[in-house]
Image: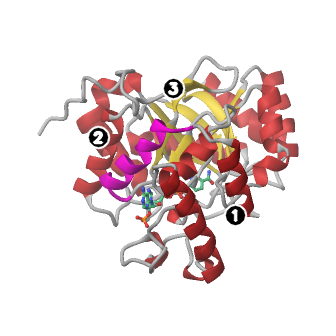
Amino acid sequence: MTYLANPARYDATGDSAMEYRRCGNSGLRLPAISLGLWHNFGGIDVFENYRDILRTAFDRGITHFDLANNYGPPPGSAEENFGMLFKKDFLPYRDELIISSKAGYLMWDGPYGEWGSRKYLIASCDQSLKRMGLDYVDIFYSHRPDPNTPLEETMGALDSLVRQGKALYVGISNYSAEDTKKAIEILKRLGTPCLIHQPKYSMLERWVEGGLMDVLGDEGVGCIPFSPLAQGLLTDKYLKEIPTGSRATFAHGALLHDQITPELIQKIGKLNAVAIERGQTLAQMALAWLLKDQRVTSVLIGASRVSQLLDSLECLKNKNFSQEELGKIEGILK
Ligand SMILES: NC(=O)c1ccc[n+]([C@@H]2O[C@H](COP(=O)([O-])OP(=O)(O)OC[C@H]3O[C@@H](n4cnc5c(N)ncnc54)[C@H](OP(=O)(O)O)[C@@H]3O)[C@@H](O)[C@H]2O)c1
């Protein structure tokens, strides 16, 4: 059946209405919740399921979908599947969408299939556009820093992609605070400002608080934390057992069984109790906890089914924390 987007998707009324936040000092606003296609949209996944997730996301005001060359499995298949759905469902809405892709991790054999050379980044962006059937991506990222390529070369390639009309904005991901500062300076000199940084950030992974957030805040660059639910750990799903079909049970998942220790489960149980006191699920509290910082433009979630997406979206109803709640959470996370 032809997809017609929910006409009320941008209704600003209602307490779970989507909020759009300015990305750093740029003119671009992103939804407070964005959807990533790292897992659940690949060649091994079920078409109807990921189609419904994407449609529901857009119907609820999620205008930003995040991809990368290697998402799948197999690598490339998430972009192909997204491209197929884009053509069927989202083509009339292209100008309402922010679609991102990245290059940095291993994508093809030989010396030019990963890291940060101009050769790799430009070829990879061309491949991504072809797989998705797009003329341009809205944001193109350097997916990880390359210790063996001059930063000037990697940033120069991002600048070229914008000048070639293949990307509207550029960003970086997984760069340290120090490298981020340098990358921002180089991009500024080139005349293509750094729009956004995509770091791993959640209640369980707080490295960005040691300098990166300050750099981004001072420089007016947006921040979109990935794995804000620590790949599902910051939900109530692992409290009693490791459920069949969860990410921790997949060989291709990046969440390892061994990471789920009794100590961690105890901590998550305590966080869950605070969330219940707030009238939220733990997933909702974990997302709200990130969004309380105005330097966070958007949280980049994943979902393996529509019900998870709907659960996470409800975090928008309560993003305020009392000092007492924050103190309790800090005490648990210590
Ligand atoms: N730049 C980078 O290097 C990088 C790296 C990783 C990810 N990313 C981006 O960030 C996006 C999100 O990453 P992520 O998938 O790790 O994010 P996440 O939101 O931390 O984890 C998503 C997973 O948590 C579980 N989940 C989500 N909502 C739930 C809920 N309400 N209740 C119970 N379980 C729930 C699901 O796992 P189950 O399968 O167990 O149901 C879901 O697939 C990716 O798609 C990608 O776009 C970027």
Which residue position holds label 1?
A: 332
Judged from the image, the secondary structure of the residue bearing numbered disc 3 is strand
Mark 1: few/some/many CA within 10 Å (<14, 14-19, 20+): some
Q: Residue 238: image x %, image y %?
A: 48, 73
Q: In this view, does 220 lie to the left or right of 186?
A: left
Q: Mark 3 points at which residue?
A: 20
Which element is circle 2 on? Answer: helix
Going by the numbered disc 1, the residue's amino acid type is Ile
Camera-near label (2 vs 1) is 1
Q: Mark 3 or mark 1: which is in front? A: 1
Residue extent of the magenta highlight: 304-319
Can residue 307 be seen at all in this image of the molecule? yes
Which badge, 2 or 1, is on the more N-terminal residue? 2
Residue 68 in sight in this render: no
Q: Does 245 sit left or right of 104 as displayed?
A: left
- Label 3 packing within 10 angstroms: few (<14), some (14-19), many (20+): some
Viewer-closest of 131 and 92? 92
Instruction: Report the amino acid beneath label 3.
Output: Tyr
Position of residue 193 in the picture relative to residue 264 (left or right): right
Q: Nearer the viewer, residue 6 or 328?
A: 328
Check if mark 3's residue and mark 2's residue have beta carbons within 8 Å: no
Q: Which quadrant holds the C terminus? A: bottom right
